[in-house]
Image (cartoon, rainbow, N blue to C red):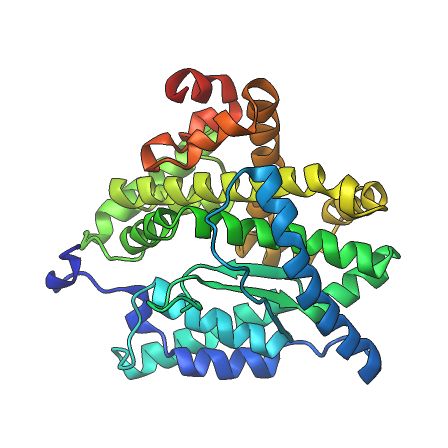
Amino acid sequence: MSDRGSDSRKLTIGGAVDWELAATVGAKLARPAPATTDYTRDQAVAQLAELARRAEQPVREVTGLNEGADITEARVVDRPQWVRAATGSMRVMTGGSDTPGGFLTSKLTGAQTGAVLAFISSGILGQYDPFTAGPEPDGTGGELLLVYPNVIAVERQLQVDPTDFRFWVCLHEVTHRVQFRANPWLAEHMSSSLSTLTHDAGEQVGDVVGRLAGYVRDQRKGEVADQNPGGVVGLLRAVQAEPQRQALDRLLVLGTLLEGHAEHVMDAVGPAVVPSVATIRARFDHRRQRKQPPLQRIIRALLGFEAKMNQYTRGKAFVDEVVGRVGMARFNTIWTSAQTLPLPPEIEEPQRWIDRVL
């Protein structure tokens, strides 16, 4: 166990957020769901739950990841319900407590967090939360969430077959459930990195400003390395101490792997169970790449959406290439431990991971 909490200079982000206020604000600010009849809504909720169950077996077969446990039920939610679930998960991830420190600070950050989650709530189709108490006797197992208003909105926008699209979405999200349930250490690895990232290193302001000035200077000279990209991620790394930089890199690599693996599985399973998968993939990728209004582009960049899209592309290319060269069985060595996960440069050069690990 970590003893970080014994250092009075270090405060978790979670302790500075009023999570109840974040949930309340976020739920109130969430955009209204697309207009639907009661029948359409109830049918979508029931079908998403059923398709999440059906997706589990083909995902287990394609990935070769099968922990043998029973298939757990997905929770199909609306936007405010997703916001409340997200605040609960973030509270656990960041070490938040029921008694946040600093009344005004916690209220302000709580309101800000709620506003951010409200914005995200209209775009997320689903997620697997490994930090939420699950169905196992010890409370483990996590929870799969599917946000039905967003699924309905996107399938209408893309003009695709609703059943096929819903199954396609479930394949992606169920892959995340399989990843974490077959490899329980992943949640601890993520939690440990988040713990490092969200603790104050007790540094002097001058040290942070100095690193920021160096980052700006390198940007002007074009000397920022690929593993320290520009934009929000690059700026974040620039003001961090080395332990936080390493933790951020671990999280970025893990996220890239998990998303890329899920994208690979969607395409591998899709043709057998989703008849219109080619049309869905083409239209969905076009939707991801379309131009956004300037203000929305800024907000999306600040919230890391562009980095998330990059994770899908880079991660899928990595998984596609490794699986193509060595097969899925040998690829699964990647799930052995933190030491077998790819290093940042290996995402771009999969052969380097193959040479190091296999």
The one of 168 and 65 positioned closer to us in this rendering: 65
Residue at image point 61% right, 55% down? 300
Q: Quadrant of residue 4?
A: bottom left
Q: Is residue 325 left or right of residue 68?
A: right
Residue at image point 46% right, 25% down? 346
Q: Is residue 250 left or right of residue 316?
A: left
Picture layout, residue 355 above or below residue 142: above
Q: Is residue 207 left or right of residue 168?
A: left
Picture layout, residue 87 above or below residue 67: below
List x then y, in percent, for residue 199. 26, 57
User: Which quadrant, please, contains the C terminus?
Assistant: top left
Q: Quadrant of residue 9?
A: bottom left
Q: Quadrant of residue 12?
A: bottom left
The image shows a total of numbered marks equal to 0
The one of 58 and 132 positioned closer to us in this rendering: 58
Q: Kindly tell me whether residue 270 is visible in this rendering.
A: yes
User: Which quadrant, please, contains the N terminus?
Assistant: bottom left
The one of 318 and 295 positioned closer to us in this rendering: 318
Residue at image point 54% right, 57% down? 303
Residue at image point 29% right, 66% down? 95
Picture layout, residue 90 above or below residue 215: below
List x then y, in percent, for residue 77. 62, 74
List x then y, in percent, for residue 246. 32, 39
List x then y, in percent, for residue 16. 31, 72
Q: Kindly tell me whether residue 223 is visible in this rendering.
A: no
